[in-house]
Image (tube, rainbow, N blue to C red):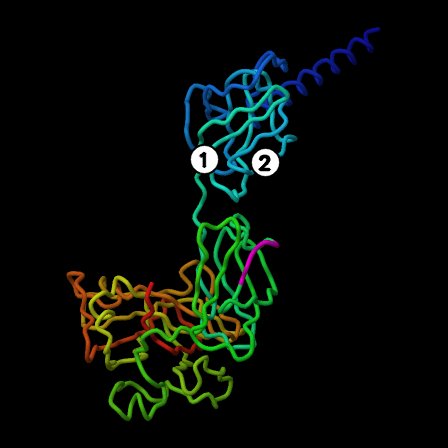
Amino acid sequence: MTHMKIINQISYAALTVLVLLLSACQKDIVDHPDGDDFSSDGAPKIEKITPADQLETSITQGEMGQWLAIQGDNLAQVKAILFNDVNVDLKKIYAVRRRINVAIPAEAPTKLTNTITVQTEQGEVTYPFTILFPELVVNGFENEFAAAGTDAVVTGRFFDLYGLSGESASITIDGNPLKVVEKSDTRLVFTIPEGTAEGAEVVLNSPKMKTPYRLKFRDRGVPFFASYEKSYLFGQGFLWTDQGYFTDGTQEGDPVSPIGGSFFRRRNTYGAWNWDTLIAGHFDLADADVAAHTENYNVKFEVWTPKTNPLSTGDFIFWSTQSNDKMKLRWNPASGGSSFNTNGEWRTITLDAKTWFQSNDGKNTLKTGSNDLTIVYQPQNALDADFALTNFRFVKK
């Protein structure tokens, strides 16, 4: 008998602990109403919407994935809940007479109404509510100067949300559908047809987007230099740094230039904090709008590193007129903590023209005619570096 009593005590204690654990888990997920009442005797009515964990705080807007409490009357026996025109999975809600606990769906609507609709066995009610969607982010082409006949990659964020990775997405170039090789939430890969002209327009679109997103294939913009051949850069007095830093593409390990011809390539063993002037000289600018409105333009160029030798450290430092160090534009490709590796392919880099061409007081220094140009590489640690640069240009934002 004593043995049985001990077992019963242990079982009771274990059951008590289990109940407490389940209760705690339930509170972590959602606060269910006390005294469940699943009755309904009329059309549903919504009185207010609150966060599920702040039942006295009315709100008029929320973000995807946020848990809400829809409060009112006759809210049980739910047949459908819609945020805009997006249906909620009813298996993931908790509905009683005076309250529904529901999470805002992580899906963009086809039609934006800024409403919540609740349908029950007794009727339907619509209530004003705005969902705050993240903006579609399109970074652009990984390599804006991919060759026709090869695959081009566009990166960004929220492609799933805006339908760009779905079956209803439309990806065209000059109005013609493109062969899509890969689609995900952050990456689109498609094949550029042979013979595609420079400047052709790529359009990304889906029923979930307000307006299509447009990109230009191989947009030349306003180039710094008409050519990267030594006879032009040095023969006509644009640059006065080491001519050995430029290659015609025939040296061991040279990639093929994305724009053809010669390009800058530097292979060097650096000590920590070495100051290496890569390019120094000037370029001529004829475009008056670029000169007057640097805030409306980016500077773009292509960078290459071999697969086996990424850049693990270092700043590329850019300036035009001499200025304090704090006013110089610095680009550290390894600033995110990972080595910068283009895996033997050219990659497009985008920098702000306004930050590049400014004086110590932040005023625009770019002008039509001749403009000074200096590019320096300075690693923070010792390394063996190998990288290439080409195709510097102004492109409108």
Q: Nearer the viewer, residue 277 or 49?
A: 49
Packing grade of label 1 (10 A; few <14, some 14-19, many >=20) is some
Question: Horizontal placement of 236 versus 87: left or right?
Answer: left
Q: Is residue 168 magenta?
A: yes
How far from the left and from the top, in percent, is residue 77?
A: 64, 21
Give SS at disc 2.
strand
Q: Which residues are magenta?
A: 167-171
Residue kind at label 1, given as amino acid type: Asn
Q: Is residue 327 magenta?
A: no
How far from the left and from the top, in percent, is residue 75?
A: 57, 19
Residue kind at label 2, given as amino acid type: Asn
Q: Is residue 396 shown above or below 131?
A: below
Q: Nearer the viewer, residue 63 or 26?
A: 63
Question: Horizontal placement of 66 versus 23: left or right?
Answer: left
Q: Nearer the viewer, residue 295 or 253?
A: 295
Q: Which residue is mark 1?
A: 114
Give SS at disc 1.
loop
Question: Measuring 53% from the left and 50% from the top, which residue is drawn there?
Answer: 207
Q: Nearer the viewer, residue 213 or 373?
A: 213
Q: Please state the total of marks drawn on the protein image.
A: 2
Q: Quadrant of the C terminus?
A: bottom left
Question: Horizontal placement of 336 versus 233: left or right?
Answer: right
As measured in the structure, the alpha-carbon distance from the residue carrying label 2 to the one carrying label 1 is 14 Å
Q: Is residue 260 shown above or below 184?
A: below
Q: Which residue is mark 2?
A: 87
Q: Quadrant of residue 391?
A: bottom left
Q: Quadrant of residue 181?
A: bottom right
